[in-house]
Image: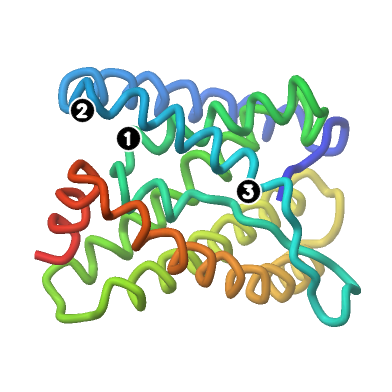
């Protein structure tokens, strides 16, 4: 999902950076005003967990390709959208700076895709099913899958707009693979959420989603 340096057009890079900076500025204000102080160290733990979990790849189609946890849906369920953008931005930035996963010039786009659009799409799923009787496991699975597929759509559009490949090829390829990767995302999210909900802070978050 990380887009590397040197392939997107300057216009797309600039637009992604502007949108990301604006959203993150809003995230800082919202988190500062509304988030419990006790949640801050837990956010750090979550960022570390997602960072470590992204290092573990699962094979697809007989190991012809692989996928890994993105984590936006998981963090959005536990913390909400605004704090999650800060958690995911930390992860994406460390990956770019330390491991050259993605790149510095394209950091704004990768933050937009994985730290903003992924948790945003997951949060919309949670809001959609907030008052339903849908089991939490089903809801977070759907949110995990949607977050990956939506992110792949936007990445494909960015590649198409930069004339890297045609829109048709980018959309067809990325959506196909990430629809499969999204299943893994959903399953991992389902597996982790019950453990996280044992914390009183996370339990309150879960009650908000299921009430």
Instruction: Report whether 40 appears left or right of 63.
Output: left
| Mark 3 residue element | helix
Checking the image for residue 53, the label placed there is 3
The single residue placed furthest to the right in the displayed view is: 64
Q: Which residue is mark 1?
A: 82
Q: Is residue 135 above or below residue 71?
A: below
Q: Residue at x 86, y 57 (%)?
A: 165
Q: Which residue is mark 2?
A: 35
Marks 2/1: CA distance? 9 Å
Tell me residue 94's x, y (percent): 67, 25
**Residue 57: quadrant of the picture:** bottom right
Mark in front: 1 vs 3: 3
Mark in front: 2 vs 1: 2
Q: Nearer the viewer, residue 14 or 207?
A: 207
**Residue 24: quadrant of the picture:** top left
Mark in front: 2 vs 3: 3
Assign the C terminus to one quadrant of the image.
bottom left
Tell me residue 4's x, y (percent): 82, 37
> How dense is the environment of label 3, judged by Cα within 10 Å: few (below 14), some, or many (20 and up)?
some
Instruction: Report whether 174 appears left or right of 22.
Output: right
Q: Are marks 2 and 1 in contact (CB under 8 Å)?
A: yes
Disc with the residue nearer the chain's start (2 vs 1): 2
């Amino acid at each position: 999902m990380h887009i590397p340096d040197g392939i997107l057009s300057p216009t797309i890079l600039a637009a992604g950076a502007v949108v990301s900076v604006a959203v993150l500025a809003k995230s800082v204000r919202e988190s500062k005003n509304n988030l419990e102080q006790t949640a801050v160290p837990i956010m750090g733990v979550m960022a570390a967990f997602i960072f470590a979990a992204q290092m573990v790849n699962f094979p697809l189609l007989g190991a012809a390709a692989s996928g890994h946890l993105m984590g936006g849906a998981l963090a959005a369920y536990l913390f909400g959208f605004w704090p999650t953008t800060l958690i995911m931005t930390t992860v994406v930035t460390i990956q770019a700076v330390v491991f050259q996963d993605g790149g510095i010039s394209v950091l704004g786009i990768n933050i937009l895709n994985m730290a903003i659009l992924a948790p945003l799409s997951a949060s919309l799923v949670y809001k959609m099913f907030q008052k339903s009787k849908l089991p939490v496991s089903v809801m977070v699975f759907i949110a995990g899958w949607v977050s990956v597929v939506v992110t792949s759509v936007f990445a494909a559009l960015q590649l198409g707009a930069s004339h890297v490949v045609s829109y048709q090829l980018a959309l067809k390829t990325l959506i196909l693979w990430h629809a499969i990767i999204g299943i893994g995302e959903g399953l991992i999210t389902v597996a982790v959420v019950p453990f996280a909900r044992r914390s009183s802070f996370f339990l309150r978050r879960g009650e908000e989603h299921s009430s």
